[in-house]
Structures are given as structure tokens and as C-alpha cells.
Image (cartoon, helix red, strand yellow):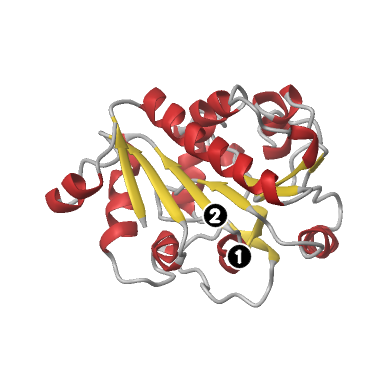
Amino acid sequence: MKVHVAKSRAELGRLAAHDIGKALREVLRTRAHVRLILAAAPSQSDMLAALRHEPEIDWPRITAFHMDEYIGLPADAPQGFANWLKREFVGHLPLARFEPINPGDNPEAACKRYAALLAEAPVDVVLLGIGTNGHLAFNDPPADLDDPLPVKVVALDTMCREQQVLDGCFPTLDAVPRRAITLTVPTLLAGGELFCCVPGLHKSAAVQAALEAPISGECPATALRTHPRCTLYLDHESSSLMKADDHNNNSRT
């Protein structure tokens, strides 16, 4: 796994967006249509803002999906991940399609519908982050790294829900939903190329585990190390617990 360390959160976003833009342009040169999966979280804001302005990306040939959604929020709740992506990214671009996850009154049926959409063709690019508990999307530990389901309903653990409060998405822990729909780890890793943006001091322990812990569901982010084309983007805060040799070998600003 490639690891790049930027001087700041904003520089991390610009660096990742430059590389993602290059990857999208390369795929668009060989394919008529590109399929993209997006993470929705404040940690992705700088990258998404920069990616919107990357040149020569033929957005009308790109269909976007996202990787998780709360269950039980009103359809227009600003904390909903589909709504967040519309505000931060999707609503600013002429995408071919954006496919939101709609749990509605039947989350299990919503999982099957979304899995069928994802199965229509390969996913080319996945943009993701890592949670404070090491989760990928809402696959909290202990996660099944070989999950047979492509999309499923999950119960969110306390650390995951606390992160939503820390990120300023909800005022209190009690306000954070307890269940969600998530793409599973195998679904995320099936993407052709992965770009993972992880800024902030509160993510440093998760980053250290992702890079150094044994690959297992106890830290789902360790599974990124099994992907042949995955790049991790850090700032100085999130990289602060990295081994010195890893930092020196992979640092880029």
C-alpha cells in the first residue's frame, strides 16, 4: 500500500484529488463509462472540494454510489450521507447518475436493491476513509473480511457512534442512529483502485493499526493492505504514530 503524508489537511485533500483525477482520466480513456464509490464524512471534505475542480474529467460519463447510510433518519435529514454528498460534491457536478442508498421502511430490501445495482458492472474507483475504531464504511470491528453479503444492515458500535459526535454531525450520542446499511469489506475491495484519505490526530491510532496490526476483522482497515492498488493519504497528525522508517519511505508533500 502506498502511503503519502501531506503537510496539512488541505494539502492532503489537494494531493489526493490530483491523483484521483489522474486515475479517473486514465479509466475514461479506455472505458465509455466509469463507476465510482464515495465515502461521506467531514474527513473527505477537502479532497472532494478539490476533486470537483480537477480538469478534464468527463463527469457525464461517471456514475457515483456511496458506501453507507443511517437507518431511521428522516429522508431530508442533513446528517444523511446521501444528502451530505449532494451538498458537498454530487450537486456541483453533471454526473451521469448518483445512486443513493434509501433504507426506507425496509432496509433489507434496500440492501438487495443496492447490491443489484453494484453488480451491474465493475466498480473502477473507491474513495474511502478509516474510522477511529478502524472501520471501513460501517464495518465496525470485529468485521468479516470475507463477508458473503455485498451490502447489509449493521448495528453501529459505541466508538463509531461517538465519532459522529466528534465530527460534529450529531449533538449527542443519543441522537446518533444505532443501525445503518453498509457496503461490506469485500465489496469495497472489489474496486479497481482505492484512495483512502485519513486526516486528524484522532485517527492516528487507527492509522497505526491499519499499517502495522495483523490483517484481521479486529481492525477492518488492515484489509486495505491486501489490495494491489490502494493509496493512503495522511497529514502530519494522523501519521504521528507511524514507524519512522515507514514515514521516511513513503512521505510526500
Residue 203 position in % (x across, y down): 35, 43
76 horizontally vs 39: left or right: right
Q: Residue at x 42, y 32 (%)?
A: 15
Q: Which residue is mark 2?
A: 193
User: What whole-number distance in Å separates the C-alpha atoms at marks 2 and 1?
Assistant: 9 Å
Q: Quadrant of residue 53?
A: top right
Please name whichever residue, 89 or 209, is drawn nearer the observer in this view of the structure. 89
Quadrant that contains the C terminus: top left
Q: Residue at x 79, y 28 (%)?
A: 94
| Above/below status of 34 relative to 172 | below
Q: Quadrant of residue 112?
A: bottom right
Quadrant that contains the N terminus: bottom left
Q: Amino acid at mark 2?
A: Glu
Q: Which residue is mark 1?
A: 190
Q: Amino acid at mark 1?
A: Ala
Crowding at dot 2, Cα within 10 Å, few <14 / some 14-19 / many 20+, comes out as many
Q: Residue at x 51, y 33 (%)?
A: 17
Q: Residue at x 25, y 47 (%)?
A: 250
| Above/below status of 59 relative to 189 | above
Residue 97 position in % (x across, y down): 83, 40
Crowding at dot 1, Cα within 10 Å, few <14 / some 14-19 / many 20+, comes out as some
20 horizontally vs 219: left or right: right
45 horizontally vs 35: left or right: left
202 horizontally vs 41: left or right: left
Please name whichever residue, 213 or 55, is drawn nearer the observer in this view of the structure. 55
| Above/below status of 53 relative to 22 | above
Please name whichever residue, 247 or 237, is drawn nearer the observer in this view of the structure. 247
Residue 178 position in % (x across, y down): 62, 51
Can residue 70 be seen from the camera position used here?
no
User: Regarding mark 2 in the picture, which secondary structure is present there?
Assistant: strand
User: Regarding mark 1 in the picture, which secondary structure is present there?
Assistant: loop
